[in-house]
Image (spheres, grey):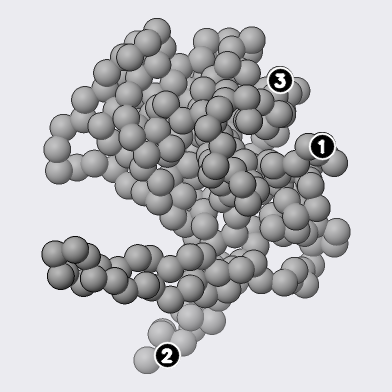
Amino acid sequence: MNILIANDDGVFAPGIIALAQALKPLGRVVVVAPEAERSGFSSALTLDRPLRPVEIAPDVWAVNGTPADCVYLSMNGLFDFEFDLVVSGINSGANLGDDVLYSGTVGAAFEGRLMKQPAIAVSLAGPNVRSYLKPDDYQQAAQWVHDFIAQGVPELPPRHILNINIPDVSELKGQKITYQGRKHLSKPITSQVDPRGRQVFWIGLAGEAVTEMKTELGEIGSDFAAVQNAYVSITPIQMDATNYAVLPALSQQFSSH
């Protein structure tokens, strides 16, 4: 198996180092990641300047671009072989609910959505994750990803990926298939004046998770609920964001004008 690993925390991030090491028993592992952190870049591609991939170690490449750039280059000519699977992560911090819209980790996985196997976005979720500095801190999550892939990635319809969030706990209770939860509105922006007298702004922190919603999915709960209860959250998400349920009503409304 040829496995492509990308991320949005940068090629030297401890999560990607731990993941690459854990997946090596499964086949050839190639890391292609941004040369520096590119969190929040979603599926952005760089169109205003050339990209420069640099091999900094055997099968480890740094790119002066976005997470999606890394996967795009890797699947469109950077290498003379094809990949069987794209794994994005392990992200330092959760990608739950509405955050998947902004996530560079998820964006990189979506760039690999046309693979024969579903691409995977993996994040380590916990309040102290950002303070972690060593690959050892990601070892349990990386081993879980290895075991998940080794037993066979579940089949999904085309243009789907799996968004996986692994709670940062000493012992995982298991895994749950989940739906994408929601968050309350983000906190207000913060305004400050820099040392040169210019007004600057900080984007507000993300809002809290919405209390578990009623669904018609039986016992299937949200990604937030799974992680809060020490379960790995596995959410199938798709590129097609069309709301098919409202299409007939909207079509009828506009056709009557």
Q: CA distance from mark 1 to mark 3?
A: 20 Å
Q: CA distance from mark 2 to mark 1?
A: 58 Å
The amino acid type found where label 2 is placed reads Ser
The image's mark for residue 171 is: 1
Location of the C terminus (image quadrant)? bottom left
Residue that carries the numbered disc 2 in the rendered image: 256
Location of the N terminus (image quadrant)? top right
- Crowd rating for badge 1 (residues with CA inside 10 Å; few <14, some 14–19, many 20+): few
The amino acid type found where label 1 is placed reads Glu
Instruction: Give x and y (percent) for residue 249.
Output: 54, 81
**Which one is in front in this view, the residue at disc 2 or the one at disc 1?**
1
**Which one is in front in this view, the residue at disc 1 or the one at disc 3?**
1
* Residue 142 visible in the current orientation: no
User: Who is closer to the viewer here, 34 or 75?
Assistant: 34
Instruction: Using the rendered view, name the quadrant where residue 143 is placed.
Output: top right
**Which one is in front in this view, the residue at disc 2 or the one at disc 3?**
3
Instruction: Using the rendered view, name the quadrant where residue 146 is placed.
Output: top right
User: Who is closer to the viewer here, 37 or 222?
Assistant: 37
Residue at the outermost front position:
195
The amino acid type found where label 3 is placed reads Ala
Q: Are marks 2 and 3 in contact (CB under 8 Å)?
A: no
Secondary element at image label 1: loop
Residue that carries the numbered disc 3 in the rendered image: 150
